[in-house]
Amino acid sequence: MFNDPQWRPVPATAGTTAPSGSGALRPLRVGMIGIGTVGRGTWELLARNQADIAARAGRGIRVVAVAARDLERAARVLGDGAASVDLTDDPMRVATHPDVDVLVEVAGGIGAARGWVAAAIAHGKPVVTANKALLAVHGNALFAQAEARGVPLAYEAAVAGGIPIVKALREGAAANRVEWLAGIVNGTSNYILSRMRAAGLAFGDALAEAQVLGYAEADPTFDVDGIDAAHKTALLAANAFGTPVGFDRAHVEGIRGLDALDVAAAAHWGYAVKLLGIARRHGEAVELRVHPALVPAAQLVAQVEGAMNAVLVHGDAQGTLLHCGAGAGAGPTASAVVADLIDVARQTVAQAGGPARCAVLPLGRPVDTLVERPVVAMDEVVTRHFLRVPLRLPAGSPAGEGGAGAALAALAGALAQAGAGVERLEVWQPSCVASEAAAPQLLALTRPARDGAVRAVAAAAAGLAGCAAPASHLRVELLD
């Protein structure tokens, strides 16, 4: 077909000129609130790749105003470019600046940031943000405002850094009924779990190492308690299922209480422990949960180590896709910010240089078509489960099954009574975990069972024959 003359391009005739492209319009003027890690990365990326960016966007993109708390530091970051930028300590001035075409909000926070973003939208300015907390809490109102005003509100950088997962869901999977998604969307927690697995570190030691290397904040609460992952998972679920953002209804557990023995025992059985954000259709309802889980080590997502992110998406037509890459940091996050700016610039080029009008809605569909679906209570979620119980053996008893027979029988009986069939049961003697000797452990893997029923068994395990403490409990996700 492609050798047929009718499919060949027609040669240009004398006097024909190509469109002037980026020279046809003045640069898109950007106002930026925040010049920290992401703001600085965005500034540097726009400068470094300006020619390619302008060619792809159809016009140049230039920062003309910056708001920062520390103006002296901001001036140092901007360097020679500071002279061409309106530098202020008043974010609202940037949000409503008459010479700003689009607002980039990368300062973070919820209360004040909501005011800046809402003001920019009210003034007809598109907004690009990396603020996942803002959108998880106030996104429904801001998305509705942006749609009503007809301007873009873009947030690729808010979910998985350099991974274009919002576009993948909202546009690439637009023809699909997305059945489920599951992902590693917090690099700090993934780094900690990777070090606990690879080096046998205790949680506190792995966290301290992450802080020294800059992977964890001085206050790591949002990361290690699962809150950051829940912000992102709620945004992904809204895009996947056409629902309002439901962060306030998500079940959230972090990794703070995870024992090194759990990570070692999981590896002993061929699993890796990962903090997962999971959203799944469940009839007319949805599951929305964040918690550590065992993943088969053979799964590609189990091999995503360090501060990397990965998201699995299963659509009825496309099947299961794995999106993997750097989920944080100046470069990857700035890449997503600038990609959104390029999208805004392309829209203005298509509209002959006028104000950007929303070509793709924030959640991929009109707000009035979103369906409020009930979220399944965690007690009713059905998964496989992993239990680890320290054993109390009489003096002189062997650590094998013979010496722990009563505990094995008692735990198997309690699980059966709770409706959780046992798939695997073993007494495990760890050699040394986190530089400490450990007592024999009873390990159990169940068949699919209600979460509430198994958690009740875990809590009551200390009262079973031969068991020295309540069971450690983790879900098992096969991601199929």
Image (cartoon, rainbow, N blue to C red):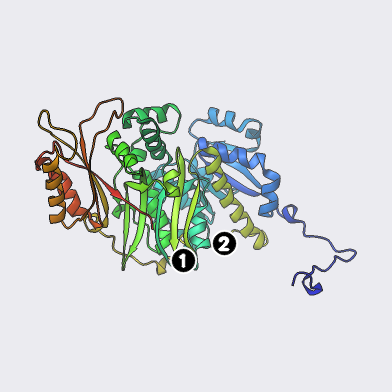
Q: Which one is in front in this view, the residue at disc 2 or the one at disc 1?
A: 1
Q: Quadrant of residue 344?
A: bottom right
Q: Characterize the local packing of mark 2: few (<14), some (14-19) or many (20 or more) Cα atoms within 10 angstroms.
A: many
Marking on residue 343: none
* Residue highlighted by disc 1: 365
Question: Seen in the image, is 336 located left or right of residue 216?
Answer: right
Residue at 65%, 34% in the rendered image: 81
Q: Position of residue 128 (x, y in %)?
A: 52, 50
Nearer to us in this view, 273 or 16: 273
Q: Earlier in the sequence, mark 2 or mark 1?
A: 2
Q: What secondary structure is found at the residue carrying circle 2?
A: loop
Q: Characterize the local packing of mark 1: few (<14), some (14-19) or many (20 or more) Cα atoms within 10 angstroms.
A: some
Q: Position of residue 416 (x, y in %)?
A: 15, 55
Tell me, yes or no, if residue 54 can be seen here.
yes
Hey, what amino acid is under mark 1?
Arg
Q: Position of residue 12 (x, y in %)?
A: 85, 65
Hey, what amino acid is under mark 2?
Arg
Residue at 12%, 40% in the rendered image: 462
* Residue highlighted by disc 2: 357
Q: Position of residue 343 (x, y in %)?
A: 59, 55
Tell me, yes or no, if residue 115 can be seen here.
no
Q: Is residue 85 above or below residue 123?
A: above
Nearer to us in this view, 64 or 93: 64
